[in-house]
Amino acid sequence: MTAAVLLLLFPQTKPSPIEMPFKAPIFSYLLISILSAVFLSANGRKALGLRHAADGVDDSIIYLWPLPKQISYGNRTVTVNPNLVLQSKGPGGSSPIVQEAFGRYKSLVFSQQSGFVLQEYDISTLTVVVDSDDDTLYLGVDESYDLYVSDATGSTEGKLSVVGEASIEAKTTYGALRGLETLSQLFTYNYKTKAVEVYKAPWYIHDEPRFPFRGLLLDTSRHFLPVNVIKQVIESMSFAKLNVLHWHIIDEESFPLEVPTYPNLWEGSYTKWERYTVEDAHEIVDFAKRRGIHIMAEVDVPGHGKSWGIGYPDLWPSPNCTEPLDVTKEFTFDVIAGILTDMRKIFPFELFHLGGDEVHEGCWTSTGHVKLWLQEHNMTAKDAYKYFVLRAQDIAISHNWIPVNWEETFNTFKENLNPQTIVHNWIGPGVCPKAVAKGFRCIVSNQGVWYLDHLDVHWEDFYNNEPLEGISDIEHQKLILGGEVCMWGETADASDVQQTIWPRAAAAAERLWSPRVTTTAAILNNSVLHRLHHYRCLLNYRGIPAAPVSNKYARQPPVGAGSCFTQ
Amino acid sequence: MTAAVLLLLFPQTKPSPIEMPFKAPIFSYLLISILSAVFLSANGRKALGLRHAADGVDDSIIYLWPLPKQISYGNRTVTVNPNLVLQSKGPGGSSPIVQEAFGRYKSLVFSQQSGFVLQEYDISTLTVVVDSDDDTLYLGVDESYDLYVSDATGSTEGKLSVVGEASIEAKTTYGALRGLETLSQLFTYNYKTKAVEVYKAPWYIHDEPRFPFRGLLLDTSRHFLPVNVIKQVIESMSFAKLNVLHWHIIDEESFPLEVPTYPNLWEGSYTKWERYTVEDAHEIVDFAKRRGIHIMAEVDVPGHGKSWGIGYPDLWPSPNCTEPLDVTKEFTFDVIAGILTDMRKIFPFELFHLGGDEVHEGCWTSTGHVKLWLQEHNMTAKDAYKYFVLRAQDIAISHNWIPVNWEETFNTFKENLNPQTIVHNWIGPGVCPKAVAKGFRCIVSNQGVWYLDHLDVHWEDFYNNEPLEGISDIEHQKLILGGEVCMWGETADASDVQQTIWPRAAAAAERLWSPRVTTTAAILNNSVLHRLHHYRCLLNYRGIPAAPVSNKYARQPPVGAGSCFTQ
């Protein structure tokens, strides 16, 4: 919605154009006013109110995923012109990221329009207002947006609508992207009229994410995933408003990434074709940024480093002890520093994952020169583990990165971790409450419910995992950055990774995006399953092979013939 | 290769530019001469000769799928410019189909080149010569091509090469498409030099399909497949040189297609969103044509028509007998005629599938008015089945279609079928020999080995299915049009259809494309598995979720971490 439109509706609120040409706070205030007015009006419109019961009638459910923060709608149907024009406004409206996204969504939404045109459409222009021309993508970047779709009644008197208008107003490019996704889900192809329509207009939506970190881990070490496949995953993440791809690039099985400073490292790849060049990595970062998605790279040290030694055997304590990496050698830390120096040029995200999980020090203490070194330095094996993690943290921090570490590091040496550390939970449900109580920030990935490779975990379990569970102090709650679902790759390769991720990752995505009251209400009113079926089918329409929702084990095929909307 | 190049190589063969500017017969003759020369030369080059043993060394295997008819190569490596330019020649060179295909393959092949450029490349131009400007796609259209990649030695003396040349010469647009696919498989990204390279240059390939009909059945009745998913399947078919998508649109479970003449028919769709408009169908036909792929539509009568009666209950013999369609009513044949009239405007392919399988006439004989009608017409139920099939054939033929029918029609009434009928085998291995002996043409789809929904059938069984098995008479052999693998949809939806199809469909694709001597030799020399692994990984690189080759049951995930090239 443009400021001009607002002024038309509410001339008394006219802001100084110099002071606040497109300020969202004013807009939000107006929106709440509008929402209240609509909620209270008796002209057939209804507000969602989140107690909206699922009654089995499709049309009573709002098929948006994830559910927005504030929402109001009417009861009219408007048509959308397949030649929809983008009108960009505001300092950031001309961002190529917005322009490209508009093109992508237009081709998704109007893919079935070929050759069929009505005489008249209600909505022919989409106005996108972006307040800032700064396209920097950082953790916590403003992703809020206000979305408005007119009901095309042609009268403003008591109707709060403007003919032929659809608009998105956002503070940043990335808010505009989120608004475009929501708008694309309001657009429905009508097979009778052969037009894209918006039901229940007019729409007023104010939306913003609950958590700034809404992640998905991809593991390209257990199986190499081609760049095209990673792009498909990133594209589908944007449909669910997930915003962090945690790229677990390297592990003990293979080292697929090119590191120019240590060019033999990718000798640890499975084959000479299962590799990522520096250019590939740049391409992935750029592709993700254009969808508002961060790439958080991981170098998992010292426990998962076996593949490093294919190129540089000195990194192994011995041929019989190939991990953890050799803690005694400066060369080990030189290599880590080299990797991070090279990676810093690729990955602009301010978080960097250093792993630190599953360190089995027994291998160190059973290797002669390491045992000797421990004695000389008066260290236990646990001390050496801490020494390694903290040195790696120092290297990351020296590159202006915030270190993220798996929870064993916190579980083992707590306050000894650098205070900047973000603790990444995975083992069980209890660690984030403890970490935030100690002042650390935390990311939730409780394996019992958010590990996608656990095929027996159903979408309900993903949906019900509440990141703030067990944390009552509001200041502590603020330290929960969000959460992440993890797609470990032992049995997930290019052939099945997408149907292992979807639709269950979407369940977590709504938990992480929508207000807690919204997800709680959605469970209570039993509407979630209907909406998730619908969302899974939407992904299928977009060419994403999301698996049936109701299968016994994830990624299982449908058990028999039937509709996508019930399987 | 351009005529100019040929003239340079063989000035003595200079044709009159008026008579035969780019005639392939001349070219083929030259090619054979070249092949012979290379085969006999002792300068380090070797000819494939099809007895080339798989020795475990990757570089000894020719990673092309399906294998071309004639092939020769050298031992040099040449680089390909990421800004490769298409030089179109001949009357059909300017076809937009060729231009678009070049763009598609370029973006596939050079997807990893972003920002990285060498100073010099050996191959900067691809010349594509197309002899005919007729883009009509019909069964048996010439798909042959000749492919040449220079070894860039810069000397013609005794080397038969020209600097900086790659060329494809074809009689038709569709031959050029097949050549582009083969060329794209010769292009390999080198992770060290960061250039796309062609190994074993120079290459001379002459190729053409063994069978004109190389099909894949998709079933959109048991599960609706969105248009984007059908397009993904078509795109992947083109990578394997399959050329007929048998679209089993409608069955007893759902009727998803719009039929303007009988607009209630698609009331039989699962939901109002699981439908294909006429525009969708046109879009699919057009998308396929641009990849040299026919769409053979099927209307399976009378046995699989239950869903028709949702919109028109009169088509059911009774509410308790919902199929076969009511044989007694003229309305039934009016509806079939209406459907075929509407479909004829969409599907230009000269074959149309009328089904005719699994007709359980017991339902007819237990329905009062049908039983009476049979008595009045002095017909048995079998007679009525024949009457139905023949009337449907007449309707199809009146629309200038060649009718295709499942084998029960032939098994039941043999010579009574219209002599134009193409018999479509599915039940077992013996029917095509019988059908061709009676003068019918035949398509092989033996369910024991070519049904993709049979998950326990391994790629070897797909590969070993010889369409001419049991047919020794050469005139009879000519009546085998080819074969088709069938992807029945009971447990295949948008989430898993591609990994159920691939890689096994590729095994059949090579059987149908490559000369029999080639596939026989490939089995004997044990190179097939290596090549199929490689081809499956190629599909993954292209974003197609082809499943592991060596799984116990089709579409199963890999059992553990590892390389794509061995799983």
Image (spheres, coloured by chain):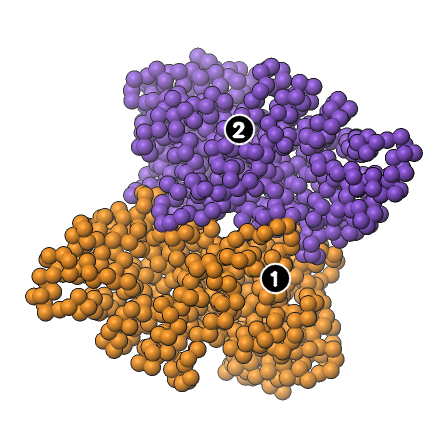
Chain colours: A purple, B orange
The residue shown at (39%, 30%) is: A527
Does residue B236 appear to the left or right of A318 in the view shown?
left
**Number of callouts in the render?**
2
Pointer 2 chain: A
Would you call the spot at circle 1 few (<14 residues within 10 Å), some (14-19), or many (20 or more)? many
Where's the N terminus of chain B, which quadrant? bottom right
* Vertical order, A442 against B378 (above or below): above
For label 1, the SS is helix
The image shows residue A498 at horizontal and vertical percentages of 53, 45
Disc number placed over residue B534 in the picture, else none: 1
* Vertical order, A92 against B204 (above or below): above
Q: Answer whether labels 1 and 2 touch (C-beta < 8 Å).
A: no
Does residue A557 appear to the left or right of B539 in the view shown?
left
The image shows residue B365 at horizontal and vertical percentages of 15, 61
Q: Are marks 1 and 2 on the same chain?
A: no
The amino acid on which the numbered mark 2 sits, given as a three-letter code, is Asn
Is any atom of residue A399 visible in this view? no
* Vertical order, A219 against B89 (above or below): above
Does residue B312 appear to the left or right of B215 in the view shown?
left
The image shows residue B494 at horizontal and vertical percentages of 44, 49
Pointer 1 chain: B
Disc number placed over residue A465 in the picture, else none: 2
Mark nearest the camera among 1 and 2 is 2
The residue shown at (50%, 26%) is: A514
Task: Kindly give the residue lying farthest to the right in the view shown.
Answer: A376
Is residue B307 or residue A346 the one in the foreground? B307
Residue B520 falls in which quadrant of the image? bottom right
Is residue A562 or residue A369 the one in the foreground? A369
Is residue A39 or residue A127 the one in the foreground? A39
For label 2, the SS is loop
